[in-house]
Amino acid sequence: MLAELVELVPGGVEEERGEGYVEYAIYGPPGELPELPDIEAAAGAGLVEIETTQIPDDWADRWRDFHEPVWIGRRLVVRPSWEPSAGADPGAPDRPIEIVIDPGRAFGTGAHATTSICLELLIEHADGDERRGAVCDLGTGSGVLAIAAARLGYGPVHAVDHELPAVEAARRNAELNGVELSVERLNLRERPAPGAPLWLANLTAPLLLAIAGSPAIGSQPRALVLSGLLASERERVVDAFDARGYEIAGERVRGDWAALRLIDADQA
């Protein structure tokens, strides 16, 4: 079946396998694909089902329907560029900090729980931080955390990521928001991140544990805002950073996810 389909559509075939079935999907404009009626046919001991669907002309833009403004309390809103400004209402008592993020191939629109609770803890930390010095965002993705830090008055703000699409997205979104970020492609397993008093890291628990146990942590930041870990992984991450001299200053749990705000007791 696969060999026959590849001959029909040399540009590619999408394959999905599951228990007791394999599914192939082929795509093409009218006239390029053969006529494929909706049928069910015997093929040896099994069945072959064929189904055709016309894809709407605006399919490439339909993903926008799933991205709406995300409010972090009433202090900050993350919105895509096609949504109107939340501060457009002149009667609004307090204009929120707005961050415009156009979703691309990089993680971080503000909608995922790990991002929103991380932003909550960043705001909480900023409220009690009069120094507002440098920040380093590890695994910056779309740059949403780094941009939020810059809008909250931190600087300079360094943003690092191993993935090239993330580096490109962070630079693009920084320009879109009119903030200055130092964005760098960096593998933390190979060299340390830029030193900063505050680190942001919305990563998975294994990566957070690796950072806690690695000399890549370099000059110890005064505070860390960590997210991306499951609530069930919280104790392991807390213990790993406790061994580095950090204590919990704040935390959030939303659904299955947790975020931590840690401070170095000796530098607090």
Image: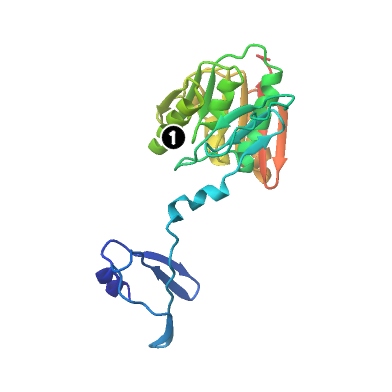
Rendered view: 4 above or below 197: below
Q: Is residue 243 something one can see in this rendering?
A: no
Residue 203 in the image, given as x and y percentages of width and height: 55, 37
Which residue does the numbered mark 1 point to in the structure image?
169
Image position, residue 243 (x, y; %) = 63, 27
Q: Residue at the location (66% across, 27% down)?
A: 96
Relative image position of residue 11 (x, y in whole percent)? 28, 61
48 versus 106 height, above or below:
below
Q: Residue at x 63, y 21 (%)?
A: 223
- Quadrant position of the N terminus in the picture: bottom left
Residue at figure coordinates x 61%, y 20% from the top left: 152
Q: Quadrant of the C terminus?
A: top right
Q: Amino acid at mark 1?
A: Ala
- Label 1 CA crowd tier, 10 Å (few <14, some 14–19, many 20+): many
Q: Nearer the viewer, residue 172 or 138?
A: 172
Q: How many marks?
A: 1
State left or right for residue 193 relative to residue 220: left
Q: Is residue 92 above or below residue 16?
A: above
- The front one of 28 and 186 is 28
